[in-house]
Image (tube, rainbow, N blue to C red):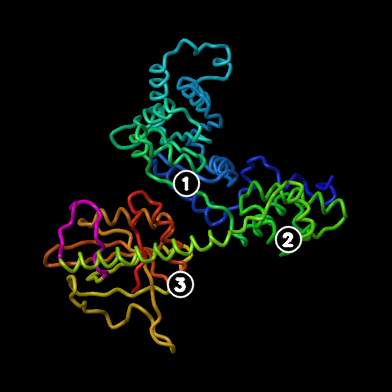
Amino acid sequence: MHEEYYGFSEKPFSLTPDPKYLYKSESHANAFDLLQYATGRREGFVVVTGDIGTGKTTLCRAILDELDRKTFTALVLNPFLSEEDLLRLVLQDFGVVSREEIKRGRLAAVSKQELIETLNEFLLSLLPLGAGALLIIDEAQNLPRAVLEQIRVLSNLETNKEKLLQIVLVGQLNLKDLLRSSDLRQLDQRVSIRYELKPLTRDETAAYIAHRLTIAGGGAAVSFAPKAIDLVHKYTGGIPRLINLICDRSLLGGYSVRTNRITPEIVKAAAAGLDLKTRRLAAIEWIQQRAAGFAAGVAVTAMLAVGIAYAMSGGQAGNASAKSAAPVAPTADAVTMSNKPAQRDQAAPVTGVKGTTGPGTPAAVDSQPAASHGPAGPQRSYSILVGSFRYEPEAATLIDQLSGLGYRTRTSRVTSSTRGTWHQVFVGPYGDLEVARGDETRVRQLPGYADAHVITQ
């Protein structure tokens, strides 16, 4: 019907999780990059959450499509399994046993321990080949607790140097609460990376619609008016599945009146047919959000003040081999810049400052200033302080991790008469505070660096 009328080769707004239709919004692109990074580094446990319809399953399939031949994969879409059924399904997906063997019940008498031992032997056989194994479990919020405990046991399959099985749990937002429950604490502590998919913004909604129209082959045959896109976003809240529903119904409405321009009236009629309501914030909700934002700003300011006071007083670090609990003032006697540019970076490089400094002691700086001065006066520069380390190799490890994700990085060595020498790791610099804040949010998703924060230079 309308697909043929508009010249589509297939349905542009199908609800099936086709990976070629994945639109990499800022949130989805970050999740995709983190999953690729975790898989390549064999980080163990990864948890990806998101509201219903945000594209979690499509993201999983897109990741599977990008993996090389040396990565064996298992995708579990049905979480309502027993512990033995889960192990059999994983072994089947890895190619250790066949579907026919399972159907004929040849593995029915095999114990759970024997299944685990078989899986372990298979995973160990991959090591000489330089291969790895990835298990993705969708709708993980519905997994029985006994199965979640079994998954924790699978995470113990490892050598002295690395994990044998990379596990990704994908689920709705309540998966986070489930993992925080007291009886699953051991599993939750094994999670190295967590990420929450966000709905699309208005501009991302427009790009998402254009992306799917183009992939389906009809990007030039039909278009949505800007005000129609505004309505699509208001009705759906940026949830991809709802966008698919209302856009498909809108295309049907456009076909019925033989138009190639989807108008706001057509979108309204489609929303009415789907019983969708616009998602506008009530006045009280708006006030509450503003108040929460103001309170958060006050809290951050207070935390920074406490941190600076701590550094000025020469307080003792809690753990000599861990990140500093209180940020050290960003004065330095050696600053190095990575040769990898930061993603979304808009600032010119900041030149290094030299000279041994301690808390509260001015640094002797190079002849070139850290921030440029224009006709309107000094231009501010921003960086993200990710962590402070007692030992330089620890800082170098974090630098490698951040650089591998595409961030421009630098280190700063701070020497204090009371606290000794510390090695700080920064991302940046940035000329735009909003860009810096955006990367700050992403850096905080890295395990162990939730306290990363933007500083002004």
Asked if residue 122 is positioned above or below residue 47 in the image, the reply reads above
Q: What residue is pinned by disc 3?
A: 432
Question: Marks 1 and 2, how far apart in space?
Answer: 35 Å
User: On the rendered structure, is 302 left or right of 114?
Assistant: left
Q: Residue 228 carries which label?
A: 2
Secondary structure under badge 2?
Answer: helix
- Residue sitting at the far front: 284
**Does the magenta portion include 16?**
no
Q: Which residue is drawn at 35% across and 54% down?
A: 450
Q: Which residue is drawn at 50% across and 39% down?
A: 170
Residue 375 percent location from the top left of the image:
44, 89
Where does the magenta region start and end? 314-330
Asked if residue 141 is positioned above or below residue 222 in the image, the reply reads above
Residue 317 percent location from the top left of the image:
18, 56
Q: Nearer the viewer, mark 1 or mark 2?
A: 2
Q: Which residue is drawn at 51% across and 20% down?
A: 97
The quarter holding residue 167 reads top left
The amino acid marked with disc number 3 is Asp
**Does the magenta portion include 327?**
yes
